Image: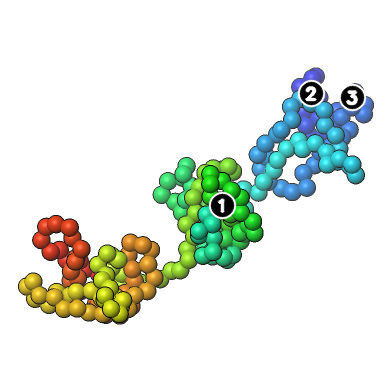
Amino acid sequence: TQARQNYDIIKTGTTSGLGNIAQTQVRATVSGMVLDVPVKAGNQVIEANNFNEGTSIASLADIKKMIFEGKVDESEVGKIKEGLPLEITVGAIENKKFDAILDYIAPKGVAENGAIQFEIKGTLKKIDSTFIRAGLSANASIILDKAEDVLAIPEALVQYDAKTKEPFVEVEIGDQKFERKNVELGISNGIFVEVKNGVSESDKIKVWNQLQGPPQYARGN
């Protein structure tokens, strides 16, 4: 029957009674999932040869080896280098972050909307059972530095000496009484800053830059 012949063609590449019509078998050189079939029944296809790259009849990918592709502005590209860790968030997958390694930074930028952008690529580390579809939009945070289990305070609490430019905070020592303490700062994410020396977790730090209202206090995190 026709159905049986179609099955044989799919399974073996040929079927009885068709002679040489279905002798050509197309085999993938790698294992993976079929992402796209750009040809349709009836389209002409040609085999790759010395003069022609041939016709692509399918796109395959190993979805266990995902690659993040993004762009970095010229003002930031000088701060990054290959080998830095990435945290990937995928818009279609909520409350999940995926670890990756930055392994490519384009040597040449491309002008886009009046700014120079540099392409970057990062290889995701071993992925759990979460299925990430190819082509999904994603964002990456490039981790320039990292500190764990450290004392951190809001960066807005830090003041700077007008002459020496050294950082300090004001710590409460009594009712409406404060003492200046010089501090040694570490890394910052723009909101919180690491404090290496100068204050302890139990100290109450004066919020000195309030625009209105009574003085407020904050504890180190």
Q: CA distance from mark 1 to mark 3?
A: 58 Å
Q: Nearer the viewer, mark 1 or mark 2?
A: 1
Snapshot quadrant of residue 190 = bottom left
- Which of disc 2 and disc 1 is earlier in sequence? 2
**In the foreground, 5 or 138:** 138
- Which of disc 3 and disc 1 is earlier in sequence? 3
**Which residue position is annotated with label 2?**
42
Q: Quadrant of the N terminus?
A: top right
Residue at left 58%, top 54%? 118
Mark 1, Cα crowd under 10 Å, few <14 / some 14-19 / many 20+, is some
Residue at left 83%, top 41%? 53
Residue 4 seen in the figure: no
**Which residue position is annotated with label 3?**
18
**Which residue position is annotated with label 1?**
116
Q: Which mark is residue 69?
A: none
- Which of disc 2 and disc 3 is earlier in sequence? 3
Above/below status of 34 relative to 195 = above
